[in-house]
Amino acid sequence: MIRVVVADDQALLRGSFRLLLDSEPDLTVVGEAGTGGEAVELTARENPDVVLMDVRMPVMDGIEATRRIGGRAKVLIVTMFDLDAYVYAALRAGASGFLLKDTPPADLLAAIRVVAAGEALLAPTVTRRLIEEFARIPAQPVARGLAGVTEREREVLTLIARGLSNTELATHLHLSLATVKTHIGRLLTKLDARDRAQLVIAAYESGLVTVAGREGGPPR
């Protein structure tokens, strides 16, 4: 059973999310929060697997709440706003996914399951905006380099940053799915990353991947 906390300042929307999630046999809502602070407290008390987190909430916004939750739960940002700054800030704060509120219900349910399983998830339009944000922001000091990362792991990391799934990675690199998962697990450990979203950030911030995808070439 996937345990979910719903954090949104609109009671009607929280109730709609609860009805939708509780109708699924493998999902259950264990709490509702109207502010970021309440979301942090509920997460500490209820130990959910996933927090559905709005961005704009009173007292404490969803970005700060995500940062304070840390690794205690997977955070899936669900918001009306797909502004560049929100995408980047949410991922930097530790969010595992980012969806818009106009996402179809079936896609939202699938996203919760994906994030609960440890995968990162971004809406297609958000992926484009995230890349644009990396192009716009000034270069930042790299907090973590790639020392100790093997050439094969660098190749895997590059493809993760370009949006390839595990299955696509296996096909592209002619590896088994189990081997791909092993490489990803080692990358998560070596780069002190919680999930694939943070691996994408590490790939860009280390300079391994640029907005152009590779020197002299378009992204792929």
Image: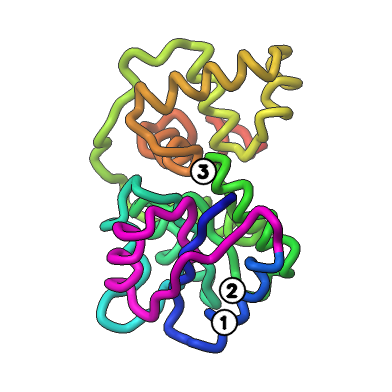
The image quadrant that residue 17 belongs to is: bottom right
**Is 149 drawn above or below residue 217 in the view shown?**
above
Look at the numbered disc 1 and give the secondary structure of its residue: helix
Residue 51 horizontal side relative to residue 94, left or right: right
Which residue type does callout 2 highlight?
Arg
The numbered mark at residue 211 is 3
C-alpha span from label 2 to label 3: 38 Å
Disc on res. 15: 1
Q: Residues within 10 Å of mark 1 (few under 14, many from 20)?
A: some
Q: Which residue is mark 2?
A: 18
As shown in the figure, which amino acid type bears the numbered disc 1? Gly
Q: Nearer the viewer, residue 32 or 203?
A: 32
Q: Which residues are magenta?
A: 24-52
Q: Residue at x 52, y 51 (%)?
A: 131
Residue 148, by quadrant, is top left
Q: Position of residue 175 (x, y in %)?
A: 69, 12
In primary-sequence order, the first of circles 2 and 3 is 2
> Residue 172 or 137: which is nearer the viewer?
172
Q: Mark 2: which secondary structure? A: helix
Q: Quadrant of the C terminus?
A: top right
Helix, strand, or loop for circle 3? Answer: loop
Closer to the chain start, of discs 1 and 3, is: 1
Picture residue at 70% right of the left edge, 68% below the top = 23
For label 3, count other residues whose C-alpha is less than 10 Å away and answer few (under 14), some (14-19) or many (20+). some
